[in-house]
Amino acid sequence: MIFCVLVVNLYFIRLECYKIPMEETFEKKRERMVNEQIKARGVTDERILSAFYKIPRHLFVDEKEKSAAYSDHPLPIGYNQTISQPYMVAIMTSYLNLTGRERVLEVGTGSGYQAAILSLLASEVYTIEKIESLAEKAASILKELGITNVHINVGDGSLGLPKDAPFDRIIVTAGSPDIPLPLIEQLEIGGIIVIPVGNRYMQELIVAKKKENELIKKQQEGCIFVPLLGRYGWS
Ligand code: SAM
């Protein structure tokens, strides 16, 4: 009798052990990602760090990539596309200089992770993806997370999103040969665009502020993004 009770207890203790560490592991990994990959490299804005703590990155990657979801590199999301390296998402977000009141356009929804981060830092996020299945998958993850201020569109984002323009901020998460003209036109005066510009294989992050008659550009770090395809991107 005593032996049976012991066996049953041990069984439940083992079950509990399996349950708790699964949750703790992703949280712990996320905490380390924020501290070691983002904060330690100079992105220290508490609002941005808090957004990275809150959004469960492992939900945005395929089952087989989940264990690597908090590692320091991009990961495949299917269709030859990637979810960007966490630090790159963080640094691009920081260049947007968000106060919480902005309407933001993201070109290249991909997994939806960058849009989820932006949803906590801006008022409304409009995002456009050319691959319909990725847009659908991103929409279902954002819904599952209860995020309601991200509006997902399917189409050629190199043309911007005229129906919802103008935007206070624009972020392009694919490498472009230049800053697409429609994006400049759809940016508010005083607005900021962050975009990787270069050849198909290597780019520089450009942060540009729109003035009345000019675009003030600043070149930041080098980066490697998948190509922005479309009318104002690569063919
Ligand atoms: N921001 C994404 C995330 O958080 O997962 C990562 C984006 S991934 C590096 C680049 C994405 O841009 C791909 O999903 C690709 O299909 C998309 N893309 C490329 N050209 C595009 C275009 N002209 N319009 C919209 N999306 C485009």
Image (cartoon, rainbow, N blue to C red):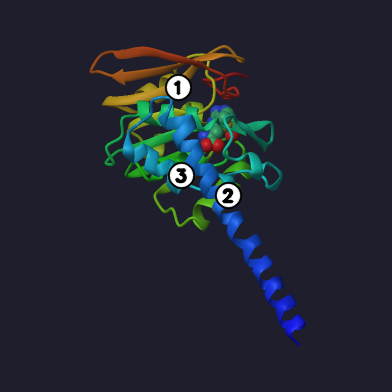
Q: Is mark 2 within 8 Å of ligand 1?
A: no
Q: Are marks 1 and 3 in contact (CB under 8 Å)?
A: no
Q: Nearer the viewer, mark 3 or mark 2?
A: 2
Tag 1 residue: 195
Between the C-alphas of marks 2 and 1, the distance is 33 Å
Q: Is mark 3 within 8 Å of ligand 1?
A: yes
Tag 2 residue: 25
- Picture quarter containing residue 118? top left
Is 58 on the left-hand or right-hand side of 220? right
- Picture quarter containing residue 133? top right
The label number, if any, that marks residue 116 in the structure image: 3
Return the disc, 3 or 2, that comes first in the chain's sequence.
2
Return the disc, 2 or 1, that comes first in the chain's sequence.
2
Q: Nearer the viewer, residue 221 or 126?
A: 221
Instruction: Please report the residue visible at 39 percent of the width from the left and 29 percent of the height from the top.
Output: 170
Quadrant of the rendered image holding ligand 1:
top right
Instruction: Please report the residue visible at 36 percent of the width from the left and 13 percent of the height from the top.
Output: 218
